[in-house]
Amino acid sequence: MPKILIVDDDKDLVEGQRIFFEGKTFEVKTALSMKDGIDAVGTYKPDIILADLMMEHYDSGFVFCKKVRDNPEMKDIPIIMQTAAPKEIGYTFDASNPKGKEWMKVHEAIEKCISSLPQEEVSVKVFQLKQEGRMLQIRVAPYVRDNETGGAIIVVSDFTEEWKNEQDQNRFVSMVAHELKSPLAAILNYINVIQTGMFDANALKIHEMLERCKIRGEALLELIRDLLYINKREAGKVEKSIEKLNLREVLFSQLEFYKVQADGRKISPTLKAAQEGPYIVKADRSDLDRVFMNLISNGIKYNRDGGVLAVELGREDGFVRIGIKDSGIGMSRDEVKNLFQESYRVRNSKTSGISGTGLGLATVQRVLNEYNGRITVQSETDKRSTFTVYLPAAEG
Ligand SMILES: Nc1ncnc2c1ncn2[C@@H]1O[C@H](COP(=O)(O)OP(=O)(O)OP(=O)(O)O)[C@@H](O)[C@H]1O
Ligand SMILES: [Mg+2]
C-alpha cells in the first residue's frame, strides 16, 4: 500500500487528513513538528509527503522541504505543501528578496487563482526563476472544485541540472561556430584580395597569401577532426590499437610537427631525458599524439615570443613522467582550478587574442584517465606553467 506522511502542527487538521486517506488505499503516518517529520521521513520512507507550509516558524515548511531535498536518500520523494495563507507563499519562497520582480509575478498569479470567480477562466501560468544558483520552474494553476474556487495549486520543480547542461551546450556551440568562422573568414578574405587584385599582383605576395590560406585551412581541418574524434569517443566508436611506444620518439615527432609554429614565435623547444634508453608505455598512438599535441600547442600558444619550451622525460614509481614547461603567461590559482573542464578557457587581456575551443585539456584528462595516467599543473601568473603527465611504464 502506498505510504503517506502528513507533517502539520495542527492536530485537528492532521487527524482530519488521516481519516480522509487512511483505509484500503493508503497507509498513513503523521508528524506534528518539522523535526518529527524529518525523523519520520528517514524511518517510515513514505511514497509521498503532505506538509504544512507554516509550522513552528513561518518558513518551517520550506526548511523541511530543503532538508528532505538535501538528503540523497530522500530527495526524490514528492512533497505537497499545503497552506491556508497563500499570500505568504511568494514571500516565503524568496525570504532574502521579498520584492523580487519575478516572485511578485508568481504572487500575483496565485492571488488571481484564489480571487477568481468559478466561471472565470484563469489560465495556468509557468515561470522560470533563478534562486541561489538554482533554476526553478513554477506552475500556478487554479483549483476548482464543485464549481467553487478552492485556491491554487503551485508546482515547483528544480531543473538546475538540465538548465546548466543546456547552457554549456549553447556556449560550446557558439564557441565552435566562432572557431570555425574566423579561419574561414580569413581564407575568403585572402581569396577576395587575390581575385580583385587590390594590390600590385606580385607572385611572391600571392604565394604568401596562399600559404596563409593553407595554414588556416589546415587548422580548420584539425579542429573539425578534433570535434569528430570527440564525438566518436563519446559514442564509444573509437577502436584502439594498443602497442608499446617509445615516448622519446612520440615527443620528438610532435615537436617536429610544431616546428613551424614554434619558429613563428621564436621558440626553440628542447627535449631532454633523465636517463638513457627508451621510455616505453602501452597505448594507442593517436591517443598519445592527442595528449602531447594539446600540451605542446598550449606551450607555444600561451608562451611569449622567444620563450622557453622544455620537454623532460623521467621515471617515478613505475610511471613515466613527462614535464612540459613553458615561460609564458601562466595562470592564477583560481584559473587552474577549472582547467580540465570541457570548453573552459581563461578569459583575460592576455588570452583575448589567442584562439582555441577549450577542449584540449579536457580531452587530455579523459585520455589519461583511460590509461590510468594523470596530469598535474604548476603555474605562476606571467611567469611559467608546467604540465606534468604520468603514464604507467611498460617493460621495454
Ligand atoms: N601552458 C599554458 N599556459 C597558460 N595558460 C594555459 C596553458 N595551457 C592552457 N592554458 C589555459 O587553459 C585554457 C584551456 O586550455 P585548452 O588546451 O583546454 O583549450 P584551448 O587551448 O583554449 O583550446 P584548444 O586546445 O581546443 O585549441 C586555455 O584557454 C588557456 O587559458
Ligand atoms: Mg589547447
Image: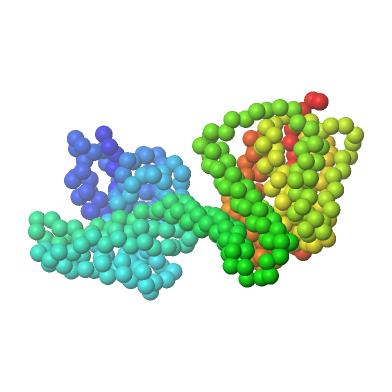
Nearer-the-camera pick, 308 or 56 = 308
What residue sits 52% from the left and 57% below the top? 177
Q: Where is residue 344, by image quadrant?
A: bottom right
Q: Which of 132 and 79 is in front in this view?
A: 132
Q: Where is residue 392 in the image (x, y as percent from the top left)?
A: 74, 33
Residue 76 showing in the rendered view: yes
Residue depicted at 67% across the width and 54% down the height: 215
Which quarter of the rendering shows the C terminus? Answer: top right
232 vs 261: above or below: above
Q: How many marks?
A: 0
Q: Name the residue: 34% across, 56% down.
A: 156
Farthest residue, direction bottom: 99
Q: Relative to 263, is 229 on the left or the right? A: left
In terms of image quadrants, where is residue 113? bottom left
* Quadrant in which residue 250 is drawn: top right
Residue 361 drawn at (x, y percent)? 65, 48
Q: Is residue 246 left or right of residue 8?
A: right
Quarter holding the N terminus?
Answer: top left
